[in-house]
Amino acid sequence: MPRAQVSFEIFPPQDTQAAARLSEAVSALAPLSPDFISVTYGAGGGTRSQTQDTLATLQRNHGVQVAAHLTCVGASRAQTLDTAAAYAAAGVRQIVALRGDAPQGTGRFTPHPDGFANTVELIAALAKTGQFTLRVGAYPERHPDAANAQADVDWLKRKIDAGASSAITQFFFEADTFLRFRDACTKAGITAPIIPGILPIQSWAGAKRFAQRCGASVPTRLDEGFTAATRDGRERLFALTQCATLCERLLTEGVANLHFYTLNAADLTRDVVRALGLAPDLALSRVA
């Protein structure tokens, strides 16, 4: 059986110190032979130039496949497609097409007057160019703007039908959360790969804040476990075990790809990949 593939998400650095930290992280992650590394795109296109610079650096210095995020927020259709054309001219062949979050403090997403109204429109326009492999977001727990869980599945099907070839989920803490969602997608006729998004927990307090913003449920057992582990000075070990165990369950259920939200830090993600035996030439025995 082929070894499962891994991919990583990073975000553009905002200053020279952050750039140095990101360079160190990517230097540690690139030898893990990721399928791709995705680079985020700030709300309102706020990190547009940094995203393009980061993509160029990844390709030039590390030789990895890159996937550029692109959103509907704060730009006209022409501006958005110009950004896509700039990606293509730079050799980028994968795009993660997202609606995008409203800029902080502005409330709910509001389309640009001349922009794409939603992700389906964006995907259809990008697909028409024939230049990109398109990936989209998916939500194993109800998106804050969705009427219900089935609405998320139905919307994902529309995005796939518009031209996306795979989906990457928001992070979650329980394997069954993803597996139920995958089953619902299959029932809805979605055949494209659904790639689980994994968050190695570098800070439990930070992870809970992320979860609250995106609607991810926090298991009581996990909250209690991190509380005890922190008290005993074992927080990192607990985080490593929790993440590796989650991934191992997904792999045993037939998942072929894992996408890690690295938060621009390599150590924990790298150790999880190694523990799972997914690091080329560095494979360790899988976690039981």
Image (spheres, grey):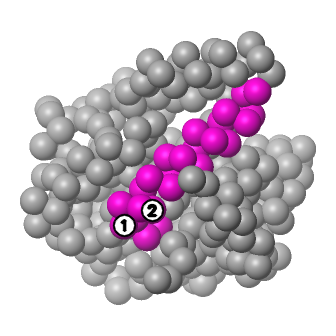
- The amino acid sitting under disc 2 is Leu
* Residue 270: percent from left, percent from top: 73, 57
Asked if residue 285 lies left or right of residue 169, the reply is right
| Percent of width and height locating residue 276 | 62, 61
Q: Residue 81 versus residue 205: which sits nearer the camera? A: 205
Q: Amino acid at mark 1?
A: Gly
Is 174 left, or right, of 282 in this rendering?
Answer: left
Mark 1: few/some/many CA within 10 Å (<14, 14-19, 20+): few
Asked if disc 2 and disc 1 are in contact, CB closer than 8 Å, the reply is yes
**Residue 278 in magenta?**
no
Q: Main secondary structure of the magenta part?
A: helix
Q: Position of residue 176 (x, y in %)?
A: 32, 43
Q: Which mark is residue 251?
A: 2
Residue shown at 40% from the left, 38% from the top: 174
Secondary element at tag 1:
loop
For this orientation, the residue located farthest to the front is: 288
* x and y, in percent, of residue 69 in the image: 50, 60
Give the image quarter of residue 42.
Answer: top right
Task: Tally the marks.
Answer: 2
- Circle 2 packing at 10 Å, graded few (<14), some (14-19), many (20+), is some
Residue closest to the far left: 188
Which residue in the structure is indicated by mark 1?
A: 254
> Is residue 73 at all visible to an observer of this figure?
no
Q: Is residue 237 one of those drawn in magenta?
A: yes
Specify start and end residues of the magenta stretch as a single range.
234-257
